[in-house]
Image: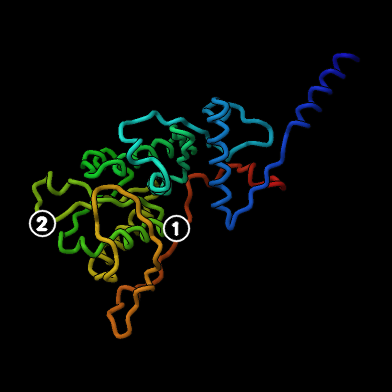
Amino acid sequence: DVAYRRQEDEEQAKLREMRTLLIVGADEESRRQAVLRIAACVEAQKAGTYADGAVPPVGGELPAGVTVQKRAPEEGDGTYLQGEDGAKLMNRAALPTGCVLHQVGEDVYVVGAPEARAMCLQLLKPLMSESPTGTIADEMTEQAVRYFVPNDKKANLTQEVVAKVEAEFKVLIYFDDGASMSGIEDSSRCVVCGGDEGSRTKATEKLKELQEIAPPAESSSWGGGGGDWDDKKDWGDDKKEGGDNSWEKKDDWKKDDKSWDKGGDDKWEKKDDW
């Protein structure tokens, strides 16, 4: 009948407008992040598409429980979240949570499960400060390990050294003013943040080992608070014949593959076209 034909024509028209997006990446994680970044761009163009409670378009489903949230602008965005340095900073905050922070124009979108998104935005705070306050870490009672590092040992925890630990255990590491606020003048407080307790513990143990070992001479020392770290140099690049490379002889670090997004029905991974 006429009504049936009209409906069929409308469905055919929708199908003709659809396009298949092929995502090619070196590994599953890079492809997953690409999908989440695309979702952020779609949300920026058509608000509500991937918001909490929304029904995503057919063929454009995200992993179970994952939605997109537009972050409210804050003071300092123009200083810390712009350009390549801003992208690196956002990646550091997102890594421990399995989320993606993606900037579209001047707006920042966070993509992930609700609890992970909340933590991701919390981890962004210390990175947007030259001198992170201890109250930020104190509020993360279940997501952070705090311990004091003697100031003469802190020099061994260079940006390159700490960046390696962050990447290996999927945590965020920074120093705040917790020691000075507690009246401890000869130490600095190190904060290790992450959603997985095992990863936080392993990262903390590794830091305590590395703070006893002098890194290569070219390693960058700590500057201000958060900042971005460009870990372009492998730790083995500075080997010197006859030098003390004892810090390289530690046992291989065990990777922790836990993810906040695992366990869901990741429909987007099952599509033949992606």
Left or right side of 148 for 60: right
Picture quadrant where residue 214 is located: bottom left
Q: Nearer the viewer, residue 202 or 78?
A: 78
Q: Nearer the viewer, residue 43 or 173?
A: 43
Label 2 close to label 1 by CB (< 8 Å): no
Task: Check the image and report above or below for 5 versus 258.
Answer: above
**The residue tagged with tag 1: helix, strand or loop?**
loop
Q: Which mark is residue 256?
A: 1
Picture quadrant where residue 168 is located: bottom left
Task: Check the image and report above or below for 102 versus 242.
Answer: above
**The residue tagged with tag 2: helix, strand or loop?**
loop
Left or right side of 48 for 269: right
Give the labeled residue for mark 2. 186
Q: Position of residue 215 (x, y in %)?
A: 28, 69
Marks 2 and 1 sit apart, C-alpha to C-alpha, by 33 Å
For the image shown, how many numbered marks are present on the structure?
Answer: 2
Q: Position of residue 257 (x, y in %)?
A: 48, 56
Outermost residue on the right side: it is 1
Q: Amino acid at mark 2?
A: Asp
Q: Position of residue 132 (x, y in %)?
A: 23, 43
Left or right side of 202 for 1: right
Q: Residues within 10 Å of mark 1 (few under 14, many from 20)?
A: few
Q: Amino acid at mark 1?
A: Asp
Task: Check the image and report above or below for 27 versus 272.
Answer: below
Q: Nearer the viewer, residue 22 or 53?
A: 22
Which residue occupies 37% across, 29% down? 73
Left or right side of 256 for 50: right
Q: Nearer the viewer, mark 2 or mark 1?
A: 2
- Quadrant (top left, top right, bottom left, bottom right) of the N terminus: top right
Picture quadrant where residue 8 is located: top right
Q: Position of residue 122 (x, y in %)?
A: 34, 38
